[in-house]
Image (cartoon, coloured by chain):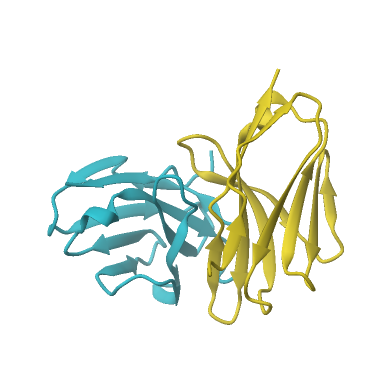
Protein backbone atom coordinates (compact mmCIF):
# COMPACT_ATOMS: atom_id res chain seq x y z
CA UNK A 1 0.00 0.00 0.00
CA UNK A 2 1.27 3.46 -0.92
CA UNK A 3 -0.56 5.41 1.77
CA UNK A 4 -2.35 7.49 -0.88
CA UNK A 5 -6.10 7.31 -0.50
CA UNK A 6 -8.87 8.48 -2.79
CA UNK A 7 -12.59 8.91 -2.38
CA UNK A 8 -15.07 7.92 -3.50
CA UNK A 9 -14.03 4.64 -5.12
CA UNK A 10 -16.87 4.73 -7.64
CA UNK A 11 -19.23 7.43 -8.82
CA UNK A 12 -22.04 7.73 -11.33
CA UNK A 13 -23.07 11.14 -12.64
CA UNK A 14 -25.12 12.46 -15.53
CA UNK A 15 -23.99 14.73 -18.31
CA UNK A 16 -23.81 18.37 -17.27
CA UNK A 17 -23.34 17.68 -13.57
CA UNK A 18 -20.32 18.60 -11.51
CA UNK A 19 -18.11 16.22 -9.53
CA UNK A 20 -15.46 16.55 -6.81
CA UNK A 21 -12.89 13.84 -6.22
CA UNK A 22 -10.62 13.73 -3.20
CA UNK A 23 -7.11 12.57 -2.52
CA UNK A 24 -5.01 12.28 0.62
CA UNK A 25 -1.30 12.21 -0.05
CA UNK A 26 1.24 9.97 1.56
CA UNK A 27 2.66 11.26 4.83
CA UNK A 28 5.55 13.63 4.19
CA UNK A 29 4.56 14.32 0.57
CA UNK A 30 3.76 17.90 -0.45
CA UNK A 31 3.00 17.36 -4.13
CA UNK A 32 -0.09 15.84 -5.72
CA UNK A 33 -0.67 15.06 -9.38
CA UNK A 34 -3.95 14.06 -11.00
CA UNK A 35 -4.39 11.78 -13.98
CA UNK A 36 -7.28 10.58 -16.14
CA UNK A 37 -7.10 7.02 -17.43
CA UNK A 38 -9.63 5.98 -20.03
CA UNK A 39 -10.21 2.29 -20.66
CA UNK A 40 -7.31 0.73 -22.53
CA UNK A 41 -5.21 3.89 -22.37
CA UNK A 42 -2.37 5.11 -20.24
CA UNK A 43 -2.91 7.80 -17.59
CA UNK A 44 -3.14 11.32 -19.00
CA UNK A 45 -1.63 14.09 -16.87
CA UNK A 46 -4.22 16.65 -15.77
CA UNK A 47 -2.19 18.84 -13.41
CA UNK A 48 0.15 18.90 -10.46
CA UNK A 49 -0.23 20.83 -7.20
CA UNK A 50 2.67 21.88 -5.05
CA UNK A 51 2.23 23.84 -1.84
CA UNK A 52 -1.36 24.71 -2.72
CA UNK A 53 -0.58 26.06 -6.20
CA UNK A 54 -1.00 24.54 -9.64
CA UNK A 55 2.45 23.63 -10.91
CA UNK A 56 2.12 22.17 -14.39
CA UNK A 57 -0.94 21.30 -16.44
CA UNK A 58 -1.74 18.86 -19.23
CA UNK A 59 -4.09 19.37 -22.17
CA UNK A 60 -7.33 19.53 -20.25
CA UNK A 61 -9.96 22.30 -20.51
CA UNK A 62 -10.56 24.80 -17.69
CA UNK A 63 -13.61 22.88 -16.48
CA UNK A 64 -11.03 20.59 -14.87
CA UNK A 65 -9.81 22.43 -11.80
CA UNK A 66 -8.17 21.55 -8.54
CA UNK A 67 -7.26 22.56 -5.05
CA UNK A 68 -4.60 21.59 -2.60
CA UNK A 69 -5.06 22.18 1.10
CA UNK A 70 -2.51 23.08 3.80
CA UNK A 71 -2.32 19.41 4.82
CA UNK A 72 -1.43 18.65 1.14
CA UNK A 73 -4.61 16.73 0.45
CA UNK A 74 -6.20 17.65 -2.85
CA UNK A 75 -9.45 17.85 -4.77
CA UNK A 76 -10.17 17.50 -8.47
CA UNK A 77 -13.29 19.27 -9.67
CA UNK A 78 -14.87 18.68 -13.04
CA UNK A 79 -17.72 20.90 -14.19
CA UNK A 80 -20.22 20.33 -17.00
CA UNK A 81 -19.49 16.63 -17.19
CA UNK A 82 -19.35 15.02 -20.62
CA UNK A 83 -19.72 11.37 -21.55
CA UNK A 84 -16.01 11.23 -22.46
CA UNK A 85 -15.11 12.16 -18.88
CA UNK A 86 -15.94 8.59 -17.91
CA UNK A 87 -12.61 7.19 -16.75
CA UNK A 88 -10.47 6.17 -13.82
CA UNK A 89 -9.10 9.24 -12.04
CA UNK A 90 -5.79 8.66 -10.34
CA UNK A 91 -4.06 10.78 -7.80
CA UNK A 92 -0.31 10.46 -7.20
CA UNK A 93 1.71 12.00 -4.42
CA UNK A 94 5.42 12.71 -4.35
CA UNK A 95 7.90 14.12 -1.90
CA UNK A 96 8.53 17.26 -3.92
CA UNK A 97 7.55 19.01 -7.13
CA UNK A 98 8.77 18.12 -10.55
CA UNK A 99 10.28 14.79 -11.37
CA UNK A 100 10.13 12.57 -8.37
CA UNK A 101 8.85 9.08 -7.70
CA UNK A 102 5.07 9.20 -7.74
CA UNK A 103 2.95 6.94 -5.57
CA UNK A 104 -0.52 6.35 -6.92
CA UNK A 105 -3.75 5.94 -5.07
CA UNK A 106 -6.29 3.27 -6.08
CA UNK A 107 -8.29 5.74 -8.15
CA UNK A 108 -11.90 6.82 -8.49
CA UNK A 109 -13.97 5.27 -11.27
CA UNK A 110 -16.31 7.85 -12.73
CA UNK A 111 -19.14 6.94 -15.05
CA UNK A 112 -21.00 9.73 -16.82
CA UNK A 113 -24.38 8.78 -18.25
CA UNK B 1 1.73 12.42 -33.06
CA UNK B 2 1.55 11.15 -29.48
CA UNK B 3 4.26 12.24 -27.06
CA UNK B 4 4.93 8.63 -26.04
CA UNK B 5 4.19 5.56 -28.13
CA UNK B 6 4.25 1.92 -27.20
CA UNK B 7 3.31 -1.33 -28.90
CA UNK B 8 0.11 -2.36 -27.09
CA UNK B 9 0.86 -6.07 -27.46
CA UNK B 10 -0.15 -8.39 -26.00
CA UNK B 11 3.15 -10.18 -25.71
CA UNK B 12 2.40 -13.81 -24.87
CA UNK B 13 5.52 -15.59 -23.60
CA UNK B 14 6.26 -18.81 -21.70
CA UNK B 15 7.73 -18.79 -18.23
CA UNK B 16 11.47 -18.36 -18.33
CA UNK B 17 11.48 -16.42 -21.59
CA UNK B 18 13.23 -13.13 -22.18
CA UNK B 19 11.02 -10.34 -23.48
CA UNK B 20 11.76 -6.76 -24.49
CA UNK B 21 9.55 -3.72 -24.89
CA UNK B 22 10.37 -0.47 -26.62
CA UNK B 23 8.87 2.95 -26.26
CA UNK B 24 9.49 6.03 -28.39
CA UNK B 25 9.07 9.66 -27.38
CA UNK B 26 8.65 12.73 -29.54
CA UNK B 27 10.28 15.54 -27.56
CA UNK B 28 14.06 15.45 -27.70
CA UNK B 29 14.17 17.80 -24.69
CA UNK B 30 12.53 15.24 -22.41
CA UNK B 31 14.53 14.91 -19.26
CA UNK B 32 13.54 11.85 -17.29
CA UNK B 33 12.19 8.44 -18.08
CA UNK B 34 10.49 5.68 -16.15
CA UNK B 35 8.82 2.33 -16.47
CA UNK B 36 5.69 1.70 -14.42
CA UNK B 37 3.79 -1.51 -14.03
CA UNK B 38 -0.01 -1.67 -13.83
CA UNK B 39 -1.92 -4.78 -12.88
CA UNK B 40 -5.48 -5.21 -14.08
CA UNK B 41 -7.81 -2.70 -12.38
CA UNK B 42 -5.03 -1.52 -10.09
CA UNK B 43 -3.00 1.67 -9.85
CA UNK B 44 0.36 2.06 -11.63
CA UNK B 45 3.48 1.34 -9.59
CA UNK B 46 7.01 2.47 -10.33
CA UNK B 47 9.10 -0.38 -11.71
CA UNK B 48 12.28 1.53 -12.37
CA UNK B 49 13.74 4.83 -13.49
CA UNK B 50 15.75 4.82 -16.72
CA UNK B 51 19.20 6.37 -16.69
CA UNK B 52 21.34 7.40 -19.64
CA UNK B 53 23.93 4.76 -18.83
CA UNK B 54 21.29 2.04 -18.57
CA UNK B 55 20.38 0.36 -15.34
CA UNK B 56 19.48 -3.04 -14.03
CA UNK B 57 17.34 -4.23 -11.16
CA UNK B 58 17.39 -7.97 -10.80
CA UNK B 59 15.77 -9.49 -13.88
CA UNK B 60 14.87 -6.08 -15.30
CA UNK B 61 17.13 -3.93 -17.46
CA UNK B 62 16.23 -0.49 -18.77
CA UNK B 63 18.04 1.37 -21.54
CA UNK B 64 17.76 4.89 -22.92
CA UNK B 65 18.77 5.90 -26.42
CA UNK B 66 18.55 9.69 -26.64
CA UNK B 67 19.75 9.87 -30.22
CA UNK B 68 16.90 7.67 -31.43
CA UNK B 69 14.50 8.82 -28.73
CA UNK B 70 13.50 5.47 -27.39
CA UNK B 71 13.68 3.59 -24.14
CA UNK B 72 13.55 -0.13 -23.63
CA UNK B 73 12.75 -2.63 -20.92
CA UNK B 74 14.17 -6.14 -20.91
CA UNK B 75 12.74 -8.81 -18.65
CA UNK B 76 14.77 -11.98 -18.23
CA UNK B 77 13.52 -15.31 -16.89
CA UNK B 78 9.87 -14.22 -17.01
CA UNK B 79 7.63 -15.22 -14.11
CA UNK B 80 3.88 -15.68 -14.09
CA UNK B 81 3.74 -12.71 -11.71
CA UNK B 82 5.28 -10.47 -14.39
CA UNK B 83 1.96 -10.55 -16.26
CA UNK B 84 0.81 -6.94 -16.29
CA UNK B 85 0.72 -3.82 -18.44
CA UNK B 86 4.00 -1.94 -18.62
CA UNK B 87 3.75 1.83 -18.98
CA UNK B 88 6.51 4.01 -20.37
CA UNK B 89 6.66 7.49 -18.80
CA UNK B 90 8.49 10.58 -20.00
CA UNK B 91 8.94 13.76 -17.98
CA UNK B 92 9.31 17.17 -19.63
CA UNK B 93 10.85 19.47 -17.06
CA UNK B 94 10.30 22.71 -18.99
CA UNK B 95 6.56 22.36 -18.51
CA UNK B 96 6.56 20.01 -15.54
CA UNK B 97 4.52 17.47 -17.46
CA UNK B 98 4.45 13.70 -17.29
CA UNK B 99 3.48 11.70 -20.36
CA UNK B 100 2.42 8.07 -20.11
CA UNK B 101 2.32 5.69 -23.01
CA UNK B 102 -0.76 3.54 -23.54
CA UNK B 103 1.06 0.54 -22.15
CA UNK B 104 2.29 -2.83 -23.38
CA UNK B 105 0.46 -5.87 -22.11
CA UNK B 106 2.51 -8.90 -21.11
CA UNK B 107 1.03 -12.35 -20.53
CA UNK B 108 3.41 -14.93 -19.12
CA UNK B 109 2.06 -18.46 -19.59
CA UNK B 110 2.98 -21.62 -17.66
Residue A52 location in percent, x, y? 39, 72
Residue A48 location in percent, x, y? 45, 68
A66 or B4: nearer the viewer = B4
Residue A64 location in percent, x, y? 29, 67
Q: Locate residue B26: give its quadrant.
A: bottom right
Looking at the image, residue A56 sits to the left or right of residue B33; the answer is left
When the figure is inspected, residue A30 is found, relative to residue B102, above or below; the finding is below
Which residue corresponds to the image point at 75% horizontal and 54% vertical from the top-left?
B72
In the rendered picture, chain B carries what hue?
A: yellow
Q: Locate residue B106: give its quadrant.
A: top right
When the figure is inspected, residue B110 is found, relative to residue A96, above or below; the finding is above
Residue B18 location in percent, x, y? 81, 35
Quadrant including the C terminus of chain B: top right
B58 or A5: nearer the viewer = B58
A7 or A64: nearer the viewer = A64
Inspect this view and state whether residue B59 appears: yes
In the rendered picture, chain A carries what hue?
A: cyan
Which residue corresponds to the image point at 84% horizontal and 58% vertical from the top-left?
B54
Number of callouts: 0
Which residue corresponds to the image point at 23% horizontal and 43% vertical from the top-left?
A11
Looking at the image, residue B52 sits to the left or right of residue B8; the answer is right
- Residue with the most extreme right position: B53
Amino acid sequence: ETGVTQSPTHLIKTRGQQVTLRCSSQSGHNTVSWYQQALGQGPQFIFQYYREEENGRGNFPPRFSGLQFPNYSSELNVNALELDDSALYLCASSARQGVETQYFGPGTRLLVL
Amino acid sequence: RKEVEQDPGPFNVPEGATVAFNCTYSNSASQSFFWYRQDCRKEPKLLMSVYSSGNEDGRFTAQLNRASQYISLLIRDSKLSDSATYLCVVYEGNFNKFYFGSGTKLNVKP
